[in-house]
Amino acid sequence: METVASTASFVSSASPVAGETDESSHGFLRTAWDFSFRMVLRYIKNSYKDDPFRTFLEVCLIGFIVWYMAKPKYNIGTNKVELSEKEIDELVEEWRPEPLVPALTEFERETLDKAIMIDGPNGTKVRLASGSNNKPVLNFASYNFLGFVDSPELGKHAVESLRKYGVGTCGPPGFYGTLDVHMELEKQIAAFIGHSAAILYSQAFTTTLSVIPCFSKRSDIIVADEGVNFAVQQAIFLSRSKVYWYKHNDMADLERILKDVNKQLVGRRGKNALPRKFIVTEGLFQNTGDISPLVELVELKHRYKFRIILDESFSFGVLGKRGAGLTDHFNIDPHEIDLLIGALCFAIGASGGFCCADKDLVEHQRLSGAGYCFSASLPGILTIAAADAIHALEADPDSYLDNLRDNAVLLRTLLKRIPGLQIDGAADSPLIHIRLAPDALVRMKRSGGAWTKTDIDRVLTDVAEEAQKDGVLLTRAMYVDDHERILPNSSIRICVSSAHTRKEVEKCAHAVKSAVSRITSKKR
Amino acid sequence: MRTLVQRVASVANLNEHSINPNSHWVNLKGSWTTNIVVIIALRLIFGTIPWTTPELSWTLTNLSYCLFQYIMFHGIIGTPFEVNQGAYDNLTLWEQMDNGEQYTPTKKFLTVVPIVVFLISTHYSSYDIATFIINFTAVLIVLIAKLPAFHRVRFFGINMGQNELN
């Protein structure tokens, strides 16, 4: 260190006469370098403080800093593939965009070509646009359970109110879209069912999609029936809750799951100790025509401390002495159902849906129900049509419900006599699914053949076409195949109406019988 | 029985390019500046207490800064307000930062600062063996908690959060 300093000072002191400015700047730089070098050495000597172990630790820490700062960013989850420019160019050359709409399969093309188009208004008798002889056919495909769809009084009153309310409300209910008729209908529905309060949604499908995620969140628990329809499945998926599925209408399985869930929650503390727990099921199942056993459900709910969300889309206006749904059917206090979801587009013949619940739950939905806050409200004429339908049902329930029940029971009895058919569902449900019996399917197949779902769908479509030739409109139950959790077996879904006469019901059964016998006699 | 080392469950999809409103503030320039300012302020405040030696005030500065860092980044899990329906409920602030990316500039800064404070403190004061061990242990704990190998690792069942139901 001393020698370096001495040579530096020697060089700086020995400045030649010629070119004095260059040499002096050179000299200045040299002194600066020498000075800082000596500073660093002095600093290190001070830090050392005669403690080698400590200095070693500090040097390790400095080394750690250097190593850490030099590391590149990376993300734990991704496996990012680094491509060269040439590879990127090649991939871009090869790329062909997929079509926005993929090509239809053969069966999808057939289904599309055979789609039923109704010419004129809907009702119990309709004209088909594609029908060759344009005779009206009996409509057993629409969910027109009480015959309100083509009721002349309802239609007349709706047209009159069109003059007053216009066509649409042009806004969500929270933003100038609430009409006086909305508030009246909500009170009317709550009083009709017997619950505390109700809230109206403008579309029945989105009612379930709004209500369930509104109350059940990511950390909550849902125990749902396996046979629930698509809307309920999507709502459960959207809620991001932990979901357990119990076998369709199997109360023993449900109890096992409820016990298991409660057992898993035992050790928890803090705010995670009490997640919200729901049992979700339907009143009248769309995919099977069954009725859920509400009495046992309520008893289980009280025993295991769960809440019930009941989707009464198909049972509202259909079941019960007054037509108020499953709670009326089983004579249970509606307040036992924590969230009662209903639809106004099936039996009531208007559009939209509702949710009946305690006042606080209904008020919460006015700010957190997605379909309520972000969709336009129900148009005025449809609200009035719904109100009229419920009035008519309240005034004279027996004429509607007794007819409906008798028709349903009659049709079911007649259909059960047809060989080769399998009929499931509750005894007085107007929604009847008919499926081909397994032995009939076996007989129909040529030896060595196997049935795919598409084949069975084709057979059922042919049955519906044959029945159409006899003047009865039937439809195959359609599903979004890729998105159903458990795709139900193919079936023809028959919906009886209270507006059908006894003769018409018998004609339907007769048409089904001849169509089935004609189709099942041919081997495929 | 509490096991020694466990990995905590996480439902957050940490690969998304979304901003976590709970942890985004650490990336802002003001946070970095506040860090430095707080350290300087601590040292000055501890220095003004009468009859403290430089060793004591540096030790106090070092320890309190490491304590703040530990409590804020590694000691508490979850978010004070609802974020993404409880996706981050089991993660400490360090694990929530930058969507789980490692070696980001903020993480590098926050790792280097305690070390630099420690080095400055050893340079400007002379520790005896006890205080040196205290200071060094504090820095070591805070450093180890920040390593990527300890992402979502929990010791002695502390901060395990909510288990996933099966």
Image (cartoon, rainbow, N blue to C red):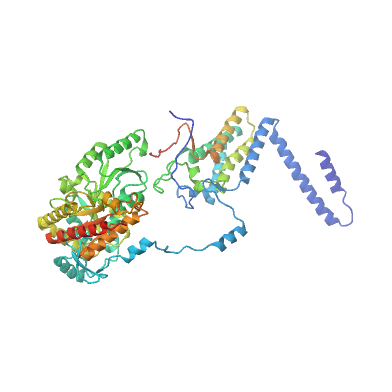
Nearer to me, B20 or B150 = B150
Q: Quadrant of residue B149?
A: top right
Residue A26: percent from the left, percent from the top?
Answer: 81, 52
Q: Quadrant of residue A159?
A: bottom left
Q: From this view, report whether residue B132 is shown above or below residue B105.
A: above
User: Number of numbered discs present?
Assistant: 0
Quarter of the figure that contains the N terminus of chain A: top right
Residue B128: percent from the left, percent from the top?
Answer: 63, 28
Whether residue A202 appears in this view of the structure is no
Q: Residue furthest right?
A: A17
Residue A209: percent from the left, percent from the top?
Answer: 31, 53
Quarter of the figure that contains the C terminus of chain A: bottom left
Identified at 21% across, 44% down, the residue is: A293
Nearer to me, B18 or B66 = B18
Whether residue A228 appears in this view of the structure is yes
Residue A306: percent from the left, percent from the top?
Answer: 27, 41
Identified at 25% across, 40% down, the residue is: A251
Nearer to me, B87 or A466 = A466
Q: From this view, report whether residue A92 is shown above or below residue B101.
A: below
Nearer to me, A383 or B56 = A383
Q: From this view, report whether residue A385 is shown above or below residue A482.
A: below
Q: Is residue A330 left or right of residue B14?
A: left
Q: Residue furthest front?
A: A447
Q: Is residue B37 left or right of residue A215?
A: right
